[in-house]
Amino acid sequence: MKFNRKSKPNIFTPRVIAVGFVFLSVFIVEFFFKTWCGVQCIRIGYEITDAMNKQQNLMNMQKNLTIELVHLQSPQVLMKIAKEKFELTIPEPDQVIVIP
């Protein structure tokens, strides 16, 4: 007895393979793009955090410098600097000349 088997048609035609390859390629490109976007978001987040820390440090430095400036402009400190660094003294009354 001979059995007559009907052969199944080949579903893997070049056209089907090409379409499958295109879909697979699009999926892989999309996966890599999504991963790249996620990495960039994390990197930018770190950069923002670093910039905010630098800004806070600069604001603290500005505050400290403002306090130091006010301290250096006080009459007591100016008098001390004038005496020690420039050897200046308070003039005697006979050394003062009033210009009208």
Image (spheres, rainbow, N blue to C red):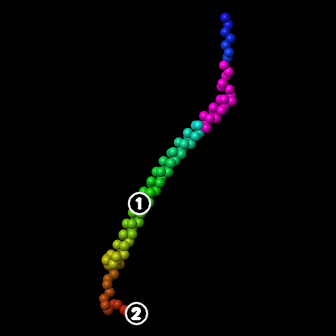
> Which residue is more in the foreground, 43 or 98?
43
In this rendering, position of residue 90 left or right of residue 39: left
Residue occupying the point 31% across, 90% down? 93
**Residue neighbourhood size for the residue with mark 1, other residues' Cα within 10 Å, grouped as few (<14), some (14–19), many (≥20):** few
Q: Main secondary structure of the magenta part?
A: helix
Three-letter amino acid code at the position of disc 2: Ile
Residue occupying the point 35% across, 90% down? 96
Query: Would you name the residue on which mark 2 appears?
Result: 99
- Measured in 3D between alpha carbons, the distance from the residue under mark 2 to the one under mark 1, in whole angstroms, is 50 Å
Residue occupying the point 47% across, 54% down? 48
Identify whether 43 is placed above or below 58. above
Task: Count the numbered circles shown.
Answer: 2
Three-letter amino acid code at the position of disc 1: Asn
Residue occupying the point 44% across, 60% down? 55
Find out whether residue 58 is within the magenta segment: no
Per the rendering, the mark at residue 35 is none
Quarter of the image containing the N terminus? top right
Helix, strand or loop for disc 2:
loop
Residue range of the region highlighted in magenta in the rendering: 8-26
Identify whether 74 is placed above or below 37. below
Where is residue 62 drawn, in percent x and y?
A: 41, 66
Q: Residue furthest bottom?
A: 100
Where is residue 98 drawn, in percent x and y?
A: 37, 92
Query: Would you name the residue on which mark 1 appears?
Result: 57
